[in-house]
Amino acid sequence: MGASAGGPARVYLGIGSNLGDRLASLRGARVRLAVLPDTRLTAASRIYVTAPVGGPEQDDYLNQVVEIVTDLSPRGLLEAVGGVESALGRERRVRWGPRTVDVDILWYHGLSISDPDLEVPHPRMKERRFVLEPLADLAPDLVLPGGVTVRAALDGVQDQDVRLFQADRAEQTLSRSGGRDMDHAAIHAEIRELAREKQAVILAHNYQRPEVQNVADILGDSLNLSREAAASQARMIVFCGVHFMAETAAILAPDRPILLPELRAGCPMADMVDVEGLRALKAEHPGAVVVSYVNTSAAVKAESDVCCTSANAVAIVGSIPAEKEIIFTPDRNLGSWAAKKAGREMILWPGFCPTHDLIEVADVERARTEHPGAKVVVHPECRPEVAEIADAVESTSGMIRFCREDDGHEYLIGTELGMIYRLSQDVPGKRFHPVTGVSVCPNMKLTTLDKVLRALREEGPVVTVPPGIRAKALRAVERMVEVGP
Ligand code: 13P
Ligand code: SF4
């Protein structure tokens, strides 16, 4: 059954529907493809709308492309795809007419096959914007027959009427789902109902899974979410993020429960600084002002004079009297970027974010070669040499603002991968690619819809901060939320 001597084959399939419940047909096809034998569904593009050509009066098509990795041979896959279509009750009344679902093998592991019933790569994909648009979401640099890339072919078909499907934003999850493409609609509805009943507000960080972002009341970066927690009138706060974020909310809103759906969601960078070590450093530099990144424990915040996030680090550092020494914890990368921007020397704690520190100059250079003309936007948790060569260095919400206001239309994003989804939702019509696919924060991904639902049902786990620590940390955190942007 093996697809090739080199192991499993990567395959792109086009799914289309313009009859009946079109979204349900697309979803049904994805779910069935994901469970084919020896096959994993590894990615799904966004959904596009295409006006039908010719034939009787009919609805617009919805089109999507999925990537699978399979051990099925091309013929085995062709049969399996036929099975998927029949299981979905495929109906096509007349040639060129409406159809409930169509699944086409577009590209099979670079193989070239030309049998009457199986032609790969698909002979007409180069001419069809409704195939190229979704394919470009997943594989813009895939080389098509004739040596042209998907991206280049797309330039030649811009006159065809294809647009991003916007009606149901929840469907627009450009997801790397690792083989599971689940229908989240039911659980989403249950969460919203329970949140309403219990007067809970759901806050989610920009790095959360798409389906968790979709269920939240408020999305944002660490600074926005802290401010929202402080200002919220809700009876309880469900924090979809990591532990230090829930602790910060508990410092700012001590009168209501702060639920963290997954207690194991920590931040390895926050764990790199401890109270004893910080006290020892303070003893070596008496009189130094301690600026701590919000990515710290409440106990470390209590030992700090002021906290900051990546959105206001430069302003906070710049506000400290020039004659004062500054200790900055725990992120050496954010610290050196803020020091440079604020024109200050600082004593940097040697911590770092394992997710951002993975991004290298070589990754930026490679991505720039693959996407010439795209602007590079990175997070200040990246290494200084990466920040140095970027076009912009921004917090996660700063990235949204920058990409929205900037006149470019293609961006290489150097931060946690969840941001690609956030940007694709908030800045429609522009293209976003990760600088590298390796920058995933496993802690941010621990929160799932099931856990959010359970947290609401059980009203726990609750994150608390001991009153003594809270009282000391509050001062530093309040200054943080007061300072711009
Ligand atoms: P911001 O969302 O504040 O930019 O922070 C990024 C981060 O790593 C949070 O853990
Ligand atoms: Fe911590 Fe980095 Fe994950 Fe943010 S992305 S939570 S800094 S490990």
Image (tube, rainbow, N blue to C red):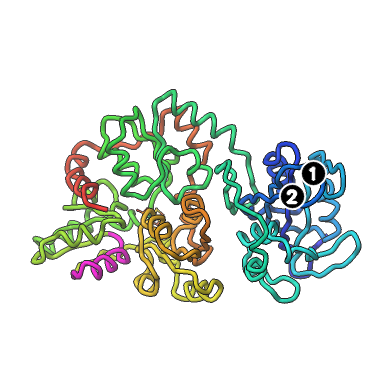
* Residue 331 within the magenta-colored segment of the rendering: yes
- Residue drawn at x 65%, y 66% is 154
476 shown above or below 280: above
Quarter holding the N terminus is bottom right
Quadrant in the picture for residue 246: top left
Magenta segment main secondary structure: helix
Residue at 76 percent across and 40 percent down: it is 19
Q: In the image as oriented, which residue stretches furthest toward the right? A: 116
The amino acid marked with disc number 1 is: Pro
User: Where's residue 252, x and y in %?
Assistant: 25, 39
Mark 2: amino acid: Pro
The residue positioned 10% from the left and 62% from the top of the image is 321
Front label number (1 vs 2): 2
Q: CA distance from mark 1 to mark 2?
A: 9 Å
- The answer to which of 473 and 187 lies nearer the viewer is 187
Question: Is residue 170 shown left or right of residue 227?
Answer: right
**Disc 1 element:** loop
Q: Nearer the viewer, residue 412 or 418?
A: 412
46 and 212: which is toward the camera:
46
* Disc 1: CA contacts within 10 A as few (<14), some (14-19) or many (>=20): many
Q: What residue lies at 21% left-to-right and 36% top-to-bottom?
A: 467
**Magenta region: which residues?**
330-345
Q: Which mark is residue 98?
A: 1
Q: Look at mark 2 in the image and give the residue it sits on.
A: 52
Look at the picture and state if 28 lies above or below 384. Answer: above
> CB atoms at circles 1 and 2 under 8 Å apart?
yes
Q: Secondary structure at mark 2?
A: loop
Residue 430 locus on image (x, y percent): 51, 59
Which mark, residue 130? none
| 443 in relation to 145, above or below | above
